[in-house]
């Protein structure tokens, strides 16, 4: 599965399920697909970056929304969202978009990871972050 990240849970026998982050108008083969464990790691690192930034940043509401989407998932299974369905502000789209790209870039900062109680697989996590960033880069105001 493209974009899969193996975590401790899966290494010790957890079931691998697909979660997707998509963008309307692009082929499903280009969506970011992750296992439940990979999604947990991705969101854990997103939370660390989110918490380290001021709450008045234009991207704050978007990262908070992504975290809530994950937290509202009940049990293991398929979940995800489309980037176009995020709560973009049409009047502030450019600033939100640039700030969210900056947050995604911050996710690559391994010094943030020291706050985790596990060590993510760097190579696979970087691939997931890159695929997510690619989806964001392709997002245009009219997609929203």
Image: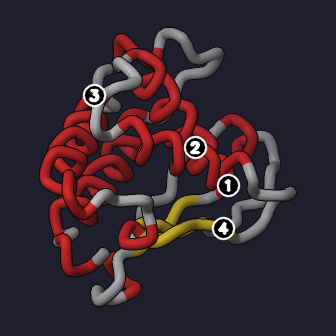
The quadrant holding residue 105 is top left
- Closer to the camera in the image, 85 or 7: 85
Decide which of tag 4 and tag 3 comes sooner along the chain.
4
Q: What is the spatial separation of the Cα atoms under label 4 and label 1, in whole angstroms? A: 9 Å
Residue holding disc 2: 67
Where residue 117 sits, quadrant-wise, is top right
N-terminal of the pair, mark 2 or mark 4, is: 2
Q: Earlier in the sequence, mark 3 or mark 1?
A: 1
Circle nearer the viewer, 3 or 2: 2
Task: From the image, tell me which residue sits under label 4.
Answer: 79
79 and 117: which one is in front? Answer: 79
Image coordinates for residue 104, horizontal then vertical, percent: 29, 40
Q: Where 79 falls versus 30 (above or below)?
A: above
Callout 3 secondary element: helix
Q: Answer with left or right where residue 53 lies relative to residue 141.
A: right
Q: Which residue bears the numbered disc 3?
A: 106
Residue occupying image coordinates x 57% and y 43%: 67
| Residue lying at the far front of the rendered structure | 91
């Amino acid at each position: 599965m493209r974009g899969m990240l193996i975590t401790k849970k899966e290494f010790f026998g957890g079931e691998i399920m697909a979660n997707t982050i998509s963008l309307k108008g692009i082929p499903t083969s280009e969506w970011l697909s992750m296992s439940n464990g990979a999604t947990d790691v991705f969101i854990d690192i997103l939370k660390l970056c989110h918490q380290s930034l001021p709450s008045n940043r234009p991207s704050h509401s978007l990262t908070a929304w992504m975290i809530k989407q994950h937290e509202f998932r009940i049990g293991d299974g398929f979940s995800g969202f489309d980037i176009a369905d995020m709560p973009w502000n049409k009047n502030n789209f450019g600033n939100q978009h640039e700030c969210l790209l900056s947050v995604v870039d911050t996710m690559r900062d391994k010094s943030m990871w020291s706050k985790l109680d596990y060590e993510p697989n760097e190579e696979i996590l970087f691939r997931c972050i890159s695929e997510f960033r690619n989806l964001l880069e392709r997002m245009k105001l009219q997609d929203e």
